[in-house]
Image: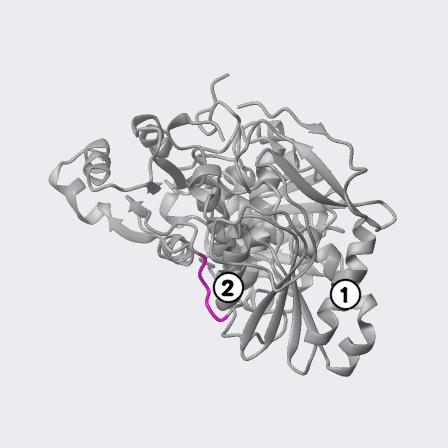
Amino acid sequence: MNNPQLDRDGNLKHLLSIEGLPKKILNQILDTAESFVGVAEREVKKVPLLRGKTVCNLFFENSTRTRTTFEIAAKRLSADVISLNVSTSSQSKGETILDTVDNLIAMHADMFVVRHAQSGAAHLIAKHVPPHIHVVNAGDGRHSHPTQGLLDVFTIRKYKPDLHNLRIAVVGDILHSRVARSEIHALTTLGVPEIRVIAPKTLLPTQVEKLGVHVFHDMAQGLKDVDVVMMLRLQNERMNGAMLPSSQEYFKTYGLTQEKLKLAKPDAIVMHPGPMNRGVEIDSTVADGEQSVILPQVTYGIAIRMAVMAILAGGSPAGASA
Amino acid sequence: MTKNHKTASTSQLPNAEDLLKILAQKIHPLLQENTALVGIHSGGVWLMQRLLILLQDSIQKFHVEHGTLDVSFYRDDYSQRGLKAENRPSQISFDVENKHIILIDDVFYTGRTTRAAMNELFDYGRPASIALAALVDRGGRELPIAPQVVAANIELDANQNLQLVQQPDNTLTLALIHQNDNTRT
């Protein structure tokens, strides 16, 4: 089977989705990120790996946090970074995605970080570009958001190093979440034995069990004795029609409060990919509480994105084997 | 390109444990106030850990600090070879500013690793001085860099690769590996 993410020698060429990445590559990214965490704590927060390379952030859909962390990551690798908010530029004048990409290649871009509301946009660009150019998917539609999945796994590994002994609950809008799918794939690949999803039926994809998860519709049952509670954002902007009664109602049933959190293990960590809807999926006292690792997730996100770009940009250019 | 490794007889190589003692004797007079030992992964870190014990009296007396460097992010062959799959975080937990740093490496060869290590150190601060101590200088320098302290000089061909090996009981040995792929590291 031809995997567009890997080259002939099995090295990472593009990062499009966590699906299809072997455990070896996942661990390589996580271990490399470990080395980059320390870089941010030094006097000079930069390494020279991507010196002279140009990274293009192509954002066809707005996402301030993801764009900012990719930008910081590329800059800490010494790359030149251009961030294009394409939704507000040529696209509105009728230029196609691939024309935009071709123009940037003509300007000698070396890497594209792509965010698009349509699933498969990053794949399309990866198929189109010449072999020395690398593509990172920064979120496409409902499909996947691999660096977010990786940074969540990295955060879990930081606080709970023994992945083979964990019970993890993913709570909320699984249906619209590209994060959840990436994450469940990564966690399963790395050997986490029990992953639960907790959500109302209307926010679960059909046949979600096929991902290898245990399904709960009740917080009290689902949170019992878990090590990690991963809250998802209620994706208002992706909802068509009335899937939920109201956000207050949702908070009452599925919002994470201190009381509900007490059902998890006492040392359980609470995660959220941001941006948070305080008082909808998570209570402020939990978001700002001792068990919350929501801000460390942001910090680790930079290390993960540095690792991905560093692994992609290095080595065997134009198919030469190292 | 396929690598064809063949381990030569290591009998003609000096004993690494003997060399370590010589290295410790030669480093000893360099220790003073404000000194720090920094081992370069992997061999240099093994050597440093042993030196911390062998030189412990002076190290305590002068409050000598220590740290480790993995120079993967500073190598000059990154664009050809990419990142090694296994890299470890550098750990410099002391303030580099105005320290007399003694870099420790196992085998000194082209000088490129030392160049990378110096560049990385400067990203932590401005040291007062940097010296280089290597267990073996094997010849083949490609940069104007040389170790101040060496325990042995061994001339080797370009297709020979000298490596320090840590045994399960933590003792150190030298091993000679022939390789057809003569890319220098």
Q: Is A265 on the left or on the right of A118, as rendered?
A: right
Which residue is the site of mark 1?
B24
Residue A225 at least partly seen: yes
Residue B60 place in picture, x, y as percent: 79, 79
Query: CA gap, disc 1 to disc 2?
Result: 34 Å
Q: Nearer the viewer, residue A155 or A63?
A: A155
Name which quarter of the figure residue B105 lies in. Answer: bottom right
User: Could you classify mark 2 by the number of other residues whose Cα lies within 10 Å: few (under 14), some (14-19), or many (20 or more)?
Assistant: some
Residue A131 place in picture, x, y as percent: 35, 29
Q: Is A38 on the left or on the right of A81, as rendered?
A: right
Q: Nearer the viewer, residue A315 or A231?
A: A315
Secondary structure under badge 1? Answer: helix
User: Could you classify mark 1 by the number of other residues whose Cα lies within 10 Å: few (under 14), some (14-19), or many (20 or more)?
Assistant: many
Which residue is the site of mark 2?
A40
Q: Nearer the viewer, residue B79 or A71?
A: B79
Residue sitting at x 84%, y 50%:
B171
Query: Within the magenta stretch, is there residue A45?
Result: yes
Disc marking residue A186:
none
Q: Is A81 on the left or on the right of A181, as rendered?
A: left
Q: Which residue lies furthest to the top in this view?
A: A1
Q: Residue furthest right?
A: B169
Q: Which residue lies furthest to the left in this view?
A: A93
Secondary structure under badge 2? Answer: loop
Residue A294 place in picture, x, y as percent: 55, 61
Type of the residue with mark 2: Ala
| Magenta segment boundaries in residue numbering | A43-47
Q: Which of A91 and A216 is in front in this view?
A: A91
Q: Same chain for marks 1 and 2?
A: no
Residue sitting at x 85%, y 45%:
B168
Type of the residue with mark 1: Ala
Residue A254 at least partly seen: no
The subunit letter for the residue under badge 2 reads: A
